[in-house]
Amino acid sequence: MDFTDLDDRDLLVAARTDREAFAVLYRRHVGGLLAYFTRVVGRTDVAFDLTAETFAAALLALPDYRPSAAPGRSWLYAIAHNRLVDAQRRGAAETRARERLGMQAITLSSEGETVIDRLISEVDGQVVMELVGELPPEQRRALTARFLEGREYAEIAAELRCSEQVVRKRVSRGLDGLRKRLEGWARGQ
C-alpha cells in the first residue's frame, strides 16, 4: 500500500499493523525533529540521540495512540518535548526506549558535523536520505560506519578488507559528494 498520501493521524493508525506506514512518518518528520532538537540543545550529537529516542518511544507507544482533532504530528512532537524535558532534567538523553528496541545512539565525530549540521538546518529528512542514497555504495557505507555508527577507521578498514587510507579517502569523497549534492539541491530550490 502507498502511505505517502495519508495524513499523519492515518499514518499512525496504519503503523500499528504496518511498519512501512511508520517509515513514511519517520521520513516525513526526521528532518524537522533534528532541526528542532539542534536549535534547542545546540549539540548535533545530542540532537541525533533525542531524535532516535523520540522515534523509539513513538514506536513503543503506537498501540496507545488514539486519533483526535489534533494533527498526528502533535502527538509525535509531544513525545519529542517529553524526551527533551527529561534530557534537560538529567543532562543526557534517556536511553530506555532505544535500548528496549535494540537501537544504538547515533554519534558523530566533529569531522562530519559541519556537513551534517548544514543538512539538518537547511534540508528536510527525506531530502537528506535521498542525498546520502545518491552516493556510491562504498562512500555511503564508509560515511555511515564512521559518522552514524561512530566506528574507528581501523575497524571499518578491517571489515571492508582495505587500508585505513582507503576508508579515509571514501569518507572524504563522500563528504565532498554530500556538499556538492547539497549545493545542487539548494540551487534547484
Image (cartoon, rainbow, N blue to C red):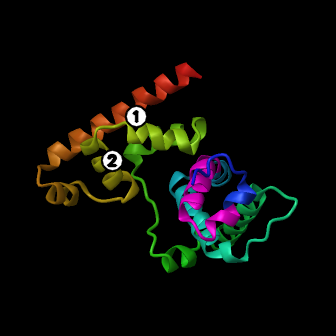
Circles 2 and 1, Cβ within 8 Å, touching? The answer is yes
- Tell me, yes or no, whether the highlighted magenta stretch contains residue 17: yes
Q: Nearer the viewer, residue 18 or 168?
A: 18
Q: Position of residue 173 (x, y in %)?
A: 28, 34
**Residue in the image at 50% along x and 76% along y:** 101
Q: How many marks?
A: 2
Badge 1 marks a residue whose secondary structure is: helix
| Residue 145, quarter of picture | bottom left
Name the outermost residue toward the top: 187
**Residue in the image at 17% along x and 54% along y:** 160
Check residue 143 in the rendering and tell me which mark sits there, or answer none: 2
Above-or-below relation of 174 to 155:
above
- Residue 188 relative to residue 8: left or right: left
Residue type for callout 2: Leu
**Residue in the image at 65% along x and 64% along y:** 14
Q: CA distance from mark 2 to mark 1?
A: 10 Å
Q: Which residues are magenta?
A: 12-32
Above-or-below relation of 52 to 43:
below
Q: Position of residue 46 (x, y in %)?
A: 55, 59
Q: Earlier in the sequence, mark 2 or mark 1?
A: 2
Residue, disc 1: 178
